[in-house]
Image (cartoon, rainbow, N blue to C red):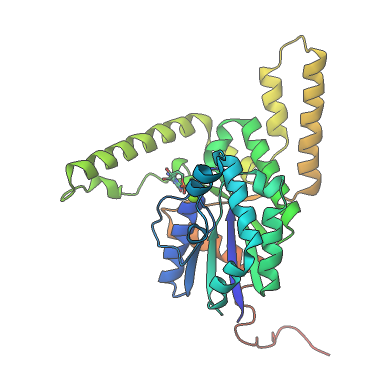
């Protein structure tokens, strides 16, 4: 059937590793032979042990210590090192014919937009006959701030244009949003059940629950149900509304220039209609399945699984 992989990208903290773990669980339940590949040299721990791990080749810690790099420069160095030692990755991947790989990438945005690193990696993967689907994660909290949201949309678009691979965009952390796309408010919180936990585990759960509730409260204020569609399929008017709201009667020359620039950017997004987001609520199995089927569709996974019967309704000449 050939080899397939998801290249999971997105800004720092957008939920890439959580996405990968959710996909791993989902694929395993649906009996897909799946492996996690970690390409983040700074990663600390994983829910699933990666089958292939860049940290076996190089770690950020070593680069920072031995070469005196800072965290960002160090990360770029690590990925360039990977590309210069690409035989290592070829050998690691080599043994997984017909399997499905989920590749967790680092969050430094420069990797997708400024440097050709990810593009070169994709070229290598294609050369080894891997079908790739890029999955770009943007977290739902970005919609609290419209300018931040649009810069996220642009970064997603930039990755799509740079990498030239089948691609989907995912709006992660939808469980933090109330409404049809996210938390419907009828789920029991697993964290409530802490019988048998140690004091430390209870404390951790309390902190997590508190943080989650704080985030939810913030989102509830920022969002009404109806508005969500405008973020999943970016509505350029959102940014001009924001500009109108914060604008003063006296617009300086510089502000006018910014307004024009903003308008040109949203026009670009609108003209190309390239970016739209699939909402992902990891607490809802149907939502996870929908994202996976969108990935499958984008890279035609399973299309060569078995020959299709001709459709009776279609008349062949
Ligand atoms: N509520 C909620 N929290 C999430 C979700 N996904 C991730 N998080 C939280 O967001 C934080 C960052 O998640 P990660 O999965 O580590 O994000 P990442 O993109 O891999 O981060 P980096 O690798 O550091 O760039 C963690 O505290 C997660 O628990 C989600 O779907 N819902
Ligand atoms: Mg991560």
Which residue reaches farthest bottom?
A: 317
* 235 relative position to 2: left or right: right
The residue sitting at 68% across, 62% down in the picture is 122
Which residue reaches farthest left?
A: 196
- On the image, the x and y values in percent for residue 64 come to 52, 43
On screen, residue 267 above or below 162: above
On screen, residue 207 above or below 281: above
Of 81 and 205, nearer the camera is 81
Which quadrant would the C terminus be assigned to in this image?
bottom right
- On the image, the x and y values in percent for residue 69 come to 57, 40
Which quadrant would the N terminus be assigned to in this image?
bottom right
The residue sitting at 70% across, 72% down in the picture is 127
Of 242 and 227, nearer the camera is 242
Confirm whether residue 286 shows in the render.
Answer: no
Confirm whether residue 37 shows in the render.
Answer: yes
Q: Hey, which quadrant is residue 257 in on the image?
A: top right
The residue sitting at 70% across, 30% down in the picture is 239
On screen, residue 144 above or below 301: above
Q: Hey, which quadrant is residue 108 in on the image?
A: top right
């Amino acid at each position: 059937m050939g080899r397939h992989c998801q290249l999971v990208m997105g800004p720092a903290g957008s939920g890439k590793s959580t996405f990968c773990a959710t996909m791993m669980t989902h694929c395993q339940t649906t009996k897909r032979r799946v492996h996690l590949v970690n390409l983040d040299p700074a990663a600390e721990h994983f829910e699933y042990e990666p089958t292939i791990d860049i940290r076996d080749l190089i770690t950020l810690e070593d680069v920072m210590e031995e070469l005196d790099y800072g965290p960002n420069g160090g990360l770029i160095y690590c990925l360039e090192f990977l590309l210069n030692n690409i035989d290592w990755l070829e050998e690691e991947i080599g043994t997984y014919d017909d399997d499905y790989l989920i590749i967790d990438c680092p969050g430094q945005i420069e990797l997708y937009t400024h440097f050709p690193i990810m593009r070169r990696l994709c070229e290598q993967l294609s050369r080894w006959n891997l079908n790739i689907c890029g999955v770009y994660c943007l977290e739902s909290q970005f919609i609290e701030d419209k300018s931040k949201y649009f810069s996220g949309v642009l970064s997603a678009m930039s990755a799509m244009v740079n990498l030239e691979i089948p691609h989907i965009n995912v709006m992660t952390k939808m469980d933090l949003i109330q409404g049809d796309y996210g938390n419907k408010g009828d789920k029991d919180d697993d964290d409530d059940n802490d019988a048998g936990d140690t004091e430390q585990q209870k404390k951790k759960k309390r902190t997590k629950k508190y943080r989650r509730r704080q985030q939810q409260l913030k989102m509830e204020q920022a969002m009404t149900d109806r508005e969500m569609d405008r973020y999943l399929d970016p509505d350029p008017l959102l940014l001009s509304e924001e500009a109108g709201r914060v604008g003063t009667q006296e617009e300086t020359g510089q502000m006018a220039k910014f307004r024009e620039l903003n308008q040109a950017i949203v026009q670009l997004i609108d003209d190309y209609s390239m970016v739209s987001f699939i909402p992902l609520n990891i607490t809802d199995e149907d939502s996870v399945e929908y994202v996976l089927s969108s990935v499958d569709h984008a890279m035609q996974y399973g299309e060569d699984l078995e020959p299709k019967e001709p459709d009776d309704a279609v008349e062949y000449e």
